[in-house]
Image (cartoon, rainbow, N blue to C red):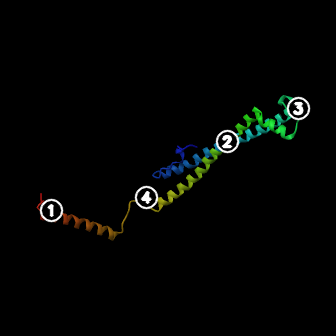
Amino acid sequence: MSSSDSFLDIDEHKLDEEWIGQPKLYGHWARKAAAARRKMDEAKSNLELVQAELDLEVRSNPEKFDLVKVTENVVKSAILQDTRYVGALKKVNDARYDYEVAQAAVSALEHRKYALQNLVSLFLSSYYAEPKSPKGRKDDVEEMTKQSVRRRGRARREDGDVD
């Protein structure tokens, strides 16, 4: 996800279209999250395989790794420094990042769903309607406007500003 996550934008004037598109959008990102999870799991499995192979290699051929004495800590240290292990670990971390980004998108779409529900509630409660005043109030405003126009007309006639 980035700062331009336009798929999260909601057009409050097209709530029907937003609701129609929501399941498809959610499904798309849920599938991306599942694929990212699979990739992360595969990268973790590969890391474990690399670690096991290196463990066997270090124990079988310690002189290749410049080891004088083979202890658990020495073997572990040799594995952690090997470029094959470092590369496999980087793939796990990259896959984990991709998965977490996809999961964040899925979570954001849950929030979008709640936002759509609330916008529909606002719409149904006439939140987006034109302001309305009670019948008596509307008549009062119209009367005040007429009186104001009359006063201005009289004032202009008294000042001699008549056209």
Say which residue label 3 marks. Answer: 60
Q: Residue at x 57, y 46 (%)?
A: 25
Identify the amino acid type marked 2. Answer: Ala
Q: How many residues crowd around disc 4 within 10 Å: few (fewer than 14), some, or many (20 or more)?
A: few
Residue 69: give x, y in percent of width and height.
Answer: 88, 35
The answer to which of marks 2 and 3 sits earlier in the sequence is 2
Q: Secondary structure at mark 1?
A: helix
Q: Quadrant of residue 128?
A: bottom left
> Of all residues shown, which one is farthest toward the front?
68
Task: Answer left or right for 118 relative to 95.
Answer: left
Identify the amino acid type marked 4. Answer: Tyr
Task: Answer left or right for 69 relative to 90.
Answer: right
Identify the amino acid type marked 1. Answer: Arg
Nearer-the-camera pick, 58 or 43:
58
Identify the amino acid type marked 3. Answer: Ser
- 78, above or below 160, in the image: above
The answer to which of marks 2 and 4 sits earlier in the sequence is 2
Q: CA distance from mark 2 to mark 3?
A: 36 Å
Say which residue label 4 marks. Answer: 128
Residue 8: give x, y in percent of width and height.
Answer: 54, 48
Say which residue label 2 marks. Answer: 36
Q: CA distance from mark 2 to mark 4?
A: 40 Å
